Amino acid sequence: MPRCPGPGPAWKTRLCRGPPPWLWPLKRPRHSFPALAARWGRNLPLVTVVLSPFSPCLSWKRMAGIFFLPFISSGFAPRFKQEENFMLGRAHPSQPRFNWSHLTPLELKNRSVGLGTESTGRGKPHFTLEGHKFLIFGGSIHYFRVPREYWRDRLLKLKACGFNTVTTYVPWNLHEPERGKFDFSGNLDLEAFVLMAAEIGLWVILRPGRYICSEMDLGGLPSWLLQDPRLLLRTTNKSFIEAVEKYFDHLIPRVIPLQYRQAGPVIAVQVENEYGSFNKDKTYMPYLHKALLRRGIVELLLTSDVLAAINLQKLHQDTFNQLHKVQPVRSRQPVNMENLPINNGSGQSYGLVLYEKSICSGGRLRAHAHDVAQVFLDETMIGILNENNKDLHIPELRDCRYLRILVENQGRVNFSWQIQNEQKGITGSVSINNSSLEGFTIYSLEMKMSFFERLRSATWKPVPDSHQGPAFYCGTLKAGPSPKDTFLSLLNWNYGFVFINGRNLGRYWNIGPQKTLYLPGVWLHPEDNEVILFEKMMSGSDIKSTDKPTL
C-alpha cells in the first residue's frame, strides 16, 4: 500500500464493510457541529475587523472594514485629508496618530484602568486602555475549531498581520455536552488558548456562550435543553436560567484570573450575542449583565446586535443485528433524540437514531421525522420521510417483517426563534392506517469516540465491487514518520462522512461544491491510521489525498 508522508502522493485503502449507518448532523442549509477552519491552512488570516465605539451604548456597531494587509504599523491612522491639504498648498499641523506599541500584554505591567471609552469635544468617541487612546484591531480565531497543535501558528499569523486583539466564542454545547458534565480539556482548554494569546502579545475579547450563533448546532446551546418543552431558550424562564447559572458557575471562575485587571489579556467580555433580532424577553439582558458582575467580571461588557453590527467575518442480512453492540433503548412509543435515556440523562446531540418495530400488515405509514428518514422493511429500503413528506405506503405483507426507520439529524438551526423547535428523530407517534404502533427498540448512533470503540467489536466483511444502501466502511491509511496537512478526495462516493482515528473530518456529497475534506497532519499517526466512512447511498472505491483543496 502506498505511503503518504504528507500532501501530494495519492493513497488508497482496502475497504471493509460493517454494521449499518450513523451520521453526523450536518445539513446544507443549516449549520451544526463545528467544522475545521481549513481555509486558514498555511495562509494569513483573511478577515479582520476594526472595532470603534461610535455609539456610547457600547455595542459592536458600525465595525469598519475588511482588510487584506501584510502588516499594520504602530502609527496606523487615516492620512487622506492631510495629504489633500498639502497638495492644495494649505499648511496644517500634523494630526496625531494612534500609538499602541507600549499597549500590549507583554509591555503593560502596571494596570489600573481597563478598556473604556472617551469623547473629546467635536471628536468621535474612541477606546482608551490605561487612559491612552487605543484602537482595537482584531480578528477571530475559534480555539475549538482549530487543532490545539495549530493554535500558536494561527495566533502568530494573526499578529503578523498587524492585529493587536483576538476574539473568540466560548461554546456552551461543547463545554457541557451532558447536563452537569463539563469539559475544558484538550481542544477545549479555553484558559490555555487565552494565555497563549497573551504570551504572543495579543489582547483578548471573550464572547462566552449561552447563545453564540457562530454557524453552530443550535447556536451553541446544548441540545439537552430541548428535552423540556416548557423550557424557553434565551429568556428568564426558570429552567433555562437554572441551566445558565450552573454553566456560569463552572465557566466564569476560569475567566476571572484572565481579566486585564488580574494581569491577564481579556479586555472585554460579551454579554450576549445578537439578541436584538431575537428579543423575546426584555429582562433577559439585564439578568445576564448582573450574573456576570455578580461573579466578578470587571472588564468592559459588550453586546453584538445583528441589526446594528457588521460582523466580518454495507448492509447485509444480519447487519442490523449487530446494533446491540452499539447502544441499550426500549420504549412503548418513539422517543426523540434529545430525550433518549442515555449520556447520564442528557439525551443524544448528534448522529442518527434507528427505530425498529415488528409489523404484520401494510398500509399508510405516517411519522414525523426530523430531519430525513430512510424506511426499511427488514434490509430493503422502501422510501424516504422528511419534514415535508410524512406519509409512505407500505405494501401488503405475507409474513411479519421488521419496520426500521433510520432518522438523520442534519443539524439544528442556529438563528431565530425557530431554535425552540429543533428536536430531532421521530417526534410524536408512528401509525399505520391511523393505528398507532407501540413497542419500539431504539438504537442511538451517536458518533463519539466511545461509539467507535464499541463499533470495532462488530463483525466486518469484505466489500463487494458495489453496494447500495447505508453502511460503514473501514480501511487503513499509512503515513510517514512526520505526517503533514493534506486533503481527502472521495471521487466516486456519494453522500456520507469520514472519520480518521475517531475524529470527524466532515461530510462529503457528490453534488458539491466542496470536493475535498481537510485533514490536519497532527491528527495522523506515523504508520497506520484508522479510516471509517459512512456512505448513505452507494459505495465508491478510491479515497485519495491531495495537496490542493477543491472547495
Image (tube, rainbow, N blue to C red):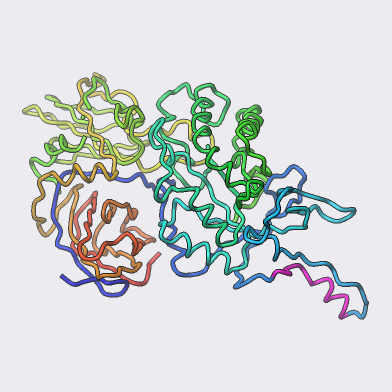
Residue 367 at x, y percent in the picture: 30, 29
Q: Quadrant of residue 360?
A: top left
* In magenta stretch: residue 86: yes
Q: Is residue 211 visible?
A: no
Along the line of sight, the residue nearer the viewer: 372 or 354: 354
Could you tell me which residue is drawn at 55 percent across and 23 percent down? Answer: 237
Could you tell me which residue is drawn at 26 percent across and 21 percent down? Answer: 333
Could you tell me which residue is drawn at 17 percent across and 31 percent down? Answer: 403
Q: Quadrant of the C terminus?
A: bottom left
Q: Is residue 485 left or right of residue 400?
A: right
Outermost residue toward the front?
Answer: 110
Could you tell me which residue is drawn at 53 percent across and 65 percent down? Answer: 156
Residue 342 at x, y percent in the picture: 29, 30
Q: Is residue 446 left or right of residue 550?
A: left
* In magenta stretch: residue 186: no
Q: Quadrant of the N terminus?
A: bottom left
Along the line of sight, the residue nearer the viewer: 11 or 463: 11
Outermost residue toward the left?
Answer: 399
Q: Quadrant of residue 66?
A: bottom right
Tally of numbered discs: 0
Residue 399 at x, y percent in the picture: 6, 28
Residue 97 at x, y percent in the picture: 79, 67
When the figure is inspected, residue 277 is found, relative to residue 456, above or below; the finding is above
Magenta stretch bounds: 74-87
